[in-house]
Image (cartoon, rainbow, N blue to C red):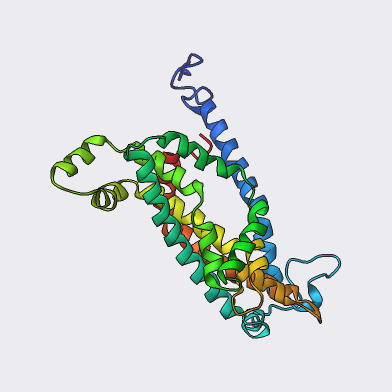
Amino acid sequence: MATRALVAPGTRGSSEYAPGSKKKWPAVLSRVLLVVVAIVFAFPLVWMVATSLKPASDVFASPPQLIGSEVKFSNYADVWTYVPFGQFMLNGLLVSLLGTMLVVLVSLLAAYAFSRLRFRGRDKLFFVFLATLMVPGEVVVVPMFLFMQQFGWVNSYQALIVPWAFGAFGTFLLRQALLSVPTELEDAAKIDGANHLRILFQIMAPIVKPTLAVLVAFTFINYWNSFLWPLIIVNGPDKATVPLGLNYFLGQGGAQWQLIMAASAISMLPTAALAIGLQKFLVRGISMTGIGGR
């Protein structure tokens, strides 16, 4: 007669007490929670895309429906003809690209000066410069407009780009990254006869490339999504960027919400492409700069 093998509780033979069985539950719960949070955050995006494909009569249908009576891909074609949306996209790309390049260049030079050069009052000047981050942008738009008026830059690309190219955020971000670079690299370059610009652009900049990627992403998105300043400084559609151009869908015939949603979906493509292209640098850069909440 076969005898049943007795297995003591807590041994390897017990599936109930298998190693790691209790540790799996926190991982499963965290994944479920992440899925729920992702669905909550993704739902407005899904609703926007769904609305962009609805006929105008179905946008405010009661009860609300995710899918309209028909799928109108023609809404995406109408976006380009209802208003000069192509001009808005070109303006936004031009302002965002040139603004990002200028911000990165200015921030890199200033960060190198505050982190590597020694001069009297350097740290005090940096703290004063850093204190400008506490000034809300809405406070300076009126004085900035008066400056632009004196320069004759109202309704120009210069006014959209230059005033916000000298902020302290990029300088602070890059300064912290440059401080982590070993001084031995700089000393070795000086022995080889390299000047400060060569040290900065050929040695320092490649090392802090992840932080540069973070600055590029943040700056491009800030320029691309800026609304208040273009609303004040731009007088017509010829220099309007995408956020300002969306207002032109609110015409005398009423708001064309299906076109606004379609235009909003199109306007997300440049920032999404930038985030995807810089993804590997962004993850590393955010962890290096400490702005990921750690």
Q: Is residue 97 visible?
A: yes
Residue 224 or 111: which is nearer the viewer? 111
State the image coordinates of residue 244 (x, y, percent, origin top left). 66, 70
Q: Is residue 200 above or below residue 251?
A: above
Q: Quadrant of residue 120?
A: top left
- 32 w.r.t. 144: above or below: above
Nearest to the observer: residue 117 or residue 14: 117
Q: Nearer the viewer, residue 164 or 59?
A: 164
The residue positioned farthest toward the front in the image shown: 150
Task: Tell me what residue is drawn at x 48 percent, y 13 percent.
Answer: 8
Question: Which residue of the protein is positioned furthest toward the left in this rendering?
Answer: 192
Q: How far from the left and from the top, in percent, is residue 217?
A: 48, 56
Query: Residue sitting at 64 percent across and 48 percent down?
Result: 136
Residue 36 placement, left or right of 203 = right
- Looking at the rendering, which quadrant does residue 52 occupy? bottom right
Q: Is residue 292 visible?
A: no
Q: Is residue 146 left or right of residue 99?
A: right
Left or right of 77 in this view: 130: left
Residue 159 in the image: above or below residue 29: below
Residue 142, x across and y down, in percent: 67, 59
- Residue in the image at 70% along x and 63% along y: 47
Position of residue 182 measured from the top left corner of the image (x, y, whole percent): 27, 35
**Residue at point 59% right, 62% down?**
147
How many discs mark residues in the rendered view? 0
Residue lying furthest right? 62
